[in-house]
Image: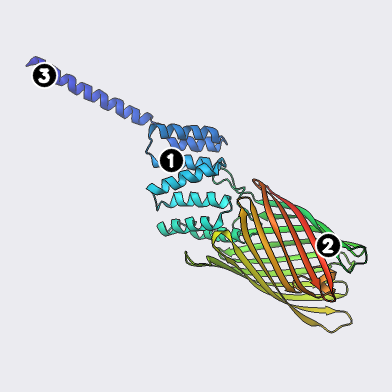
Amino acid sequence: MGFSRQRCVGVWLWVLCLSILSTAAAQQSPDWPARIREQVKQGSLDRAMVVAEEWIRAYPKDLDAMAWHARLLAWSQRWTEAEAEYRSLLLSLPVDADVLMDLAHLLTWQKRYAEALEAIERACAARPERSDCSVEQARVLRLMSGTSEESAAATGEVTDAARHEVRVGGNADFLSYSGRGGSGGASLGASLNSRWNDQWRSSEAVTRYHRYGQAATSFEGSATYRFTPNDALTAGAGTAGNQGIVPRVQGQLEYGHGFRLAPGRAVRGIEATFAQRWMRYRDARVASLSPGAILYLPKDWNWMFRLSMSRISINGFQPNWKPAGLTQLTFPLHRSLTGNLVFATGTENLGTLDRLLWRSTRAAGGGVRIRLASGQELITFLELRHFSGSRSQTSFGLAYAFRL
């Protein structure tokens, strides 16, 4: 009897010890997410990855551990591995809004905008109360338009997306009517496009023009305010010398509104724009009205078209109106290549003297954007333009862009 009582007491003591040890172990168990965040804050993604892998080894079925591992792969630009892990997670968590949004960010960085938009729509359907849904949708739609705000340099929570794009380049024009062996003009320029926050953007540019033995330097600037996720207003102005080959003063005002259509349609979204532009040359004045739209199509294709009506007043002549139209189709060629084709009719660009004097009847061309590395691109284009009176112009341009 005494032995049984002692045995019972021993069992209870053993259970109590196990309970104490278990509680102590639980209290000392590592806070995996906090450790990862600390390493990320210090800029050490490799060490953060080690912590995530320790977590997975300790708890192989912990989906939070897998999500953190995928996130770290994405931030380390191991995008193929990260995408595979996100899609594996979605097999177990098909309506997890956080995983879907993380996948959308990854696809956006790779410029796979249509797929990113689909992931965002799934995330928003799963959790409509998310405050970032409409913001992310609008951001991806803007990126699909090919504006200067690019996501390739973004790094999620590790650092802010690249806020500034610097572009330098130039183009050469070969004119059949120049009388100089076909050489007609050239321009060299540099621009800075900045994203200050979700509401404000700015753009500044300086361009040196050479035409008909004359040279002129133009300075232009604009600011864009996005007062809702789908509405933006841009105002800009520019000035140059009085040489007469480019406008000595110019101004512009543009309003844009985006429409997001239901998933599964041939057109996923539309961005409608209306722009006014004023240009004053030494001996001429131009005022133009230009409505337009961008259609966002599946597989990262988009189609832009713009109409314009310009009132041209040249000293000594009666003012007259000239209509014009332009369309551009943009499409992916490869993971790092984007192409575009352009067709125009009428005088759709009056920014140089030859465009003002010789009415353009039609133009065709195309270009390629080549992603060299994260945040770096090479942009090139070739255009053939026919003017009235059997005149023609061939233009070639090359630019290099990088993000800060």
Along the horizontal axis of the image, is 63 left or right of 326? Answer: left
Give the residue pinned by disc 1: 66
Identified by mark 2, the residue type is Asp
Tag 3's secondary structure? helix
Tag 2's secondary structure? strand
Q: Which one is in front, 388 or 271?
A: 388
Q: Using the image, determine if residue 18 lies above or below residue 271.
A: above
Quadrant housing residue 397: bottom right
Q: Which residue is drawn at 18% across and 21% down?
A: 11
Q: Using the image, determine if residue 173 lies above or below residue 99.
A: below
Q: Using the image, determine if residue 167 lies above or below residue 341.
A: above
Callout 2 environment at 10 Å: few (<14), some (14 to 19), or many (20+)?
Answer: many
Callout 1 environment at 10 Å: few (<14), some (14 to 19), or many (20+)?
Answer: many
Give the residue pinned by disc 3: 5
Q: Using the image, determine if residue 224 lies above or below residue 56.
A: below
Quote the CA–CA distance across marks 2 and 3.
104 Å
Quarter placement of the N terminus: top left
Identified by mark 1, the residue type is Met
